[in-house]
Amino acid sequence: MSVTNAVYSSITLLQQGVIGVIGDISSSWTSLSALMSSTLGIPQCSFTANAIALSDKSQYKYFFRTIPTQVIIADVMLEFASKEGWKKLGVLYTDDPLGQQFYQRTIIQAGTMDIRITQHQPISVTEEEDSLNSALTNLTESGARIIMVAANPSSKIMIQARQLGLINNDYVWLLMGDTSEDLQKQIDIYNKNHTDHQINYATDFQGLFMFDSWLALYGYPPFEAFLDKWATLNPEALAYSCMMVMAKGFGKLIQDSNNQTDQLLKLASGSLGDQLLPPIFNINYVGPEGPMVYDQNGDLTTG
């Protein structure tokens, strides 16, 4: 389906007076339909769109989803640090929606795990060398030795940290996403331009832990067999959690009303407005992937 067809389908659907939308199949197409549904005050739930931009409530006010975003990786990093007995961490993040949400979630979750964030440092998305050096220096001079990095990609940051002597036995780096291939590529580029100070990928980069969500294990026979079986299933089941959360949310909204008939009429006519924002769908529903608990952005708080 082309983008034009996707937009046409969304407009046609919304013109039919629906009270909720489930979809779309990708983040790019979802962003188009979610803009329209939010403009009209219609809640929309996606089970596949994980783009961090969709968390922006200034544009996607009525949008929520049943799939975690990359921000949830902060939980895994903190859990890992806790099990290792590391109680003081620093956070380095890009000053963009993903980085900001990652830092905010880190602060909240760290407080529940008796972990102290000793220093946080935002960096420009352009990763200019001077500002990056300053950010790394500020972090390490604060005493941070276990450092969480939320930047994509983080390869240039790691190379710069190595140049500052920060990749050694005194530091641990917790990276968001698997950047091993990109790091190797950036090192090759660096070595071509710096013949006097070569970097050895295998020996110079120790103490790096990469955290990612792997949804594909191609080449692993059980996974390949699973994919073959999955391809034969009815894709409508993928939207099950969205359907149940919406249905139960609508039901609770009507049930809790003093005038249920009037509330039902308002729901049908699309005049409930801000009563249909994502928090209304926190109804303690547990779907196939676990509890459907949302934050103020309509993103899952567990995953």
Image (spheres, helix red, strand yellow):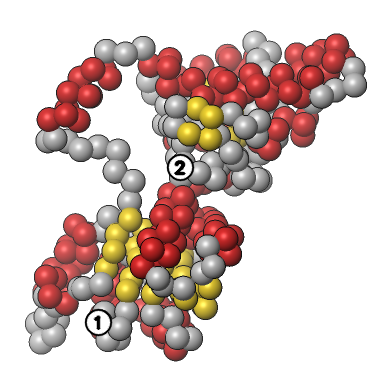
Residue 37 location (% of width, % of height):
63, 28
Q: Residue 184 bears which disc, if any?
A: none
Q: Is residue 29 visible?
A: no
Q: Residue at x 54, y 45 (%)?
A: 301
The x, y position of residue 179, in whole percent, is: 26, 58
**Residue pictured at 68% horizontal, 37% vertical:** 279
Tell me the quarter of the picture where residue 246 sits: top right
The quadrant in which the C terminus is found is top left
Quick one: SS at disc 2? loop
Tag 1 or tag 2, which sits nearer the N-term? 1
| Residue under the image location 46 percent in, 55 percent down | 75
In this rendering, the answer to whether 229 lies above or below 75 is: above
* CB contact under 8 Å: marks 2 and 1: no
Q: Residue 303 shows which numbered tag?
A: 2
Q: Residue furthest right?
A: 258
Neighbours of disc 2 within 10 Å: few (<14), some (14-19), many (20+): some
Which amino acid lies under the numbered mark 1 shown in the image of this protein?
A: Asn
**Is residue 247 something that shows in the picture?**
yes
The residue positioned 47% from the left and 21% from the top of the image is: 239
Q: Secondary structure at mark 1?
A: loop
Give residue 280's position: percent from left, percent from top: 70, 33
* Residue position marked by numbered label 1 in the rendering: 168
Instruction: Measure the alpha-carbon separation of dots 2 and 1.
Output: 32 Å
Callout 2 amino acid: Gly
- Left or right of 13, for residue 144: left
The quadrant of the rendering that contains the N terminus is top left
The quarter of the displayed image where residue 214 is located: top left
Relative image position of residue 243 (x, y in whole percent): 56, 20
Q: Is residue 131 left or right of residue 193?
A: right
User: Crowdedness of circle 1 by 10 Å Cα count: few (<14), some, many (20+)?
Assistant: some
Residue 228: image quadrant is: top left
